[in-house]
Image (tube, rainbow, N blue to C red):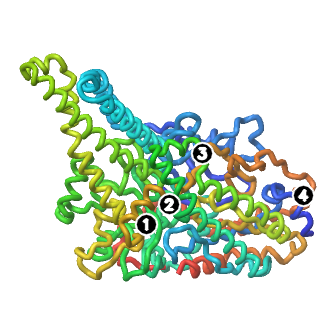
Amino acid sequence: MKDCEYQQISPGAAPPPASPGARRPGPAAPPGPGPGPPPPAAAPRWSSSGSGSGSLGRRPRRKWEVFPGRNRFYCGGRLMLAGHGGVFALTLLLILTTTVLFFVFDCPFLARQLTLAIPIIAAILFFFVMSCLLQTSFTDPGILPRATVCEAAALEKQIDNTGSSTYRPPPRTREVMINGQMVKLKYCFTCKMFRPPRTSHCSVCDNCVGQAALMQAEGVPLGECHKGTAMQEDPDKLSHGDCAWSPGSELITPAQHSPSERTAGNTHDSRQQERFDHHCPWVGNCVGRRNYRFFYAFILSLSFLTAFIFACVVTHLTLRSQGSNFLSTLKETPASVLELVICFFSIWSILGLSGFHTYLVASNLTTNEDIKGSWSSKRGGEASVNPYSHKSVITNCCAVLCGPLPPSLIDRRGFVQADTVLPSPIRSDEPACGAKPDASMVENVPGRIKNPILLGAPVFMRSSQAEAATWLKPSLAPGRTP
Amino acid sequence: SPQMLVHNLQELRRSASLATKVFIQRDYSDGTICQFQTKFPPELDSRIERQLFEETVKTLNGFYAEAEKIGGSSYLEGCLACATAYFIFLCMETHYEKVLKKISRYIQEQNEKIFAPRGLLLTDPVERGMRVIEISIYEDRCSSGSSSSGSSSGSGSSGGGGGAGAR
């Protein structure tokens, strides 16, 4: 990760770019931007929008166009997708194919022989599935915008002041008390901030995403967020530079899980156990705190739909073959066989996943914490209880599914605005976009604007790669708290 | 003079001399709901009364608690949304968004009445990912001679203040 570089902030110049430009990043797009020297392709674009008064005549850019993560935006920033859409297209294809075949081949027969309710129920279920799937895939999962330059600089200064003076800086963690329980917050090098509780950095879309965290509960003894195993087992696993959870780096071997979780994870998507909680390639997006309820509703309704279609097709074939040979029935409705095959193979993984997530919802865990056994007393050491759970299954379920929907924090359709002094993106609904500085006020301001000390900038010169690289190597020293 | 700072908030942002920024961090002691620390940062010591600042932060905390509360109308809205496969989220504004608008108006009002006359500016936390309340401190032109040393000591102590606040 080459993201630990900071430039001296000079107030008069354009602010360093937040992104090397990623409107539609392909697979070769740089993984994470930093405030280092921009690649040539991005420089003209940024400097035109970032130089404040120098940007006359240039179309103001919307924030989604300069979004630093690996997401793709459609419909002018209203819809967003993460990663490659290939598997998502497959999901859509399977669902659409099965349902359309069902309506065309099986429904007429069943509606005639049994009841008209069958196509109606199927239609309702299909509507639920599609609505939830599209909402899961195209909404913001709870991405946290990266820290602004000033914020990053202030944090950096704070860490420096309280850190040690040895050559290798200590691991960047901050301990906070949540409901009486000590939780460690890790510093994200890509997003330049301490990750709030229940937030992880998704390496696929290169964003910090809030997980489906809800309300709080009563206080309890010591535990740790995200890295439950590291605290109890091996302090060396606390590597500084890992804001990307690559496969294998924090992998918990299958032997450490209970069988039910393993089955659920494996059959659906084997990568889910390696990566953090919820980057689900089947929906083409991260599943975080904003779209978890859509995801849950999707898999629940999909299990019902699959089971329903399966049962109906079996009934259909049975009824038909009562009159004649089974083989000739198959010749009459070949599509039914295809539906049967698709449903049969997907029902196990979908049902398993539904059950698993129902368990998570009821106990208000996230997949990540569950797989890592963050709160389980089986892991040895002190018993710790999930500080986030309400103590009741019903309350937990209601909180997940019916609680307030947090807003999107990334303001995709807002305009990028840069002050001449310090960058400060302004939301699109504010009237400040066209404000012109008053000439008399500018004159009266003395040359203090050029004083870099005011922004604390010189303290943060860290342009050497070597120095940055030391932060990325796992430290052999045990984790120290600032 | 202070009157020039009051004139126009946008001009304040763009052309007045920005001295430093203070970041009020989140307070996680009650869990993951959005609350901010009410601890008074030392940089603001000479700029604003402690009580006014605390009152502002407490009011903001109250708004966020209201936004995230489960129960009452937000619960009904959630249940209705669930029953329609969340389709209505496409059509209507959620409870949270309504409260955010209230917060935005409140911050605007506070800036106009209380903070701008003192050369300060609050930034809505929602523009910073709800991580911090950013307070921009502008230079008071009257004390131009002595304030350069004041501002560097201000930015020097912000690290200590912020670090202490995190514990």
Q: Which mark is residue A4?
A: 2
Q: Secondary structure at mark 3?
A: loop
| Identity of the residue drawn at 83% across and 62% down | A447
Q: Specify the subunit that label 4 lies on.
A: A
SS for dot 4? helix
User: Label 1 near label 2: C-beta < 8 Å?
Assistant: yes
Spatial distance from mark 3 to mark 2, Cα to Cα? 42 Å
Q: Which mark is residue A161?
A: none
Look at 57% across and 39% down and name the residue there: A77
User: What separation in Å lies between label 3 and label 1 (alpha carbons)?
Assistant: 46 Å
Residue A264 rendering spot, x and y as whole percentages: 23, 53
The amino acid type found where label 1 is placed reads: Trp
First reached walking from the N terminus: tag 4 or tag 1 = 4
Report how far apart the C-alphas of labels 2 and 1 lie in the structure: 8 Å
Q: Give left or right: position of A355 versus B133.
A: left
Quadrant of residue B3 in the image?
Answer: bottom right
Question: Which residue is disc 4 drawn over?
Answer: A441
Badge 1 crowding class, 10 Å Cα cut-off, few under 14, some 14 to 19, many 20 or more, is: many
Q: Which of the two discs, 3 and 4, sits closer to the camera? A: 3
Mark 3 vs mark 2: in front: 3
From the top left corner, tell me how far across and down residue A214 is, in percent: 46, 64
Q: Secondary structure at mark 2?
A: loop
Q: Which mark is residue B92?
A: 3
Distance between the Cα atoms at labels 4 and 1? Answer: 44 Å
The residue under label 2 is which amino acid type? Cys
Host chain of mark 3: B
Q: CA distance from mark 2 to mark 4?
A: 37 Å
- Rendering quarter of residue A39: top right
Q: For marks 2 and 4, give the one nearer the viewer.
A: 4
Residues at marks 3 and 2 touching, judged by CB atoms closer than 8 Å: no
Mark 2 or mark 4: which comes first in sequence?
A: 2
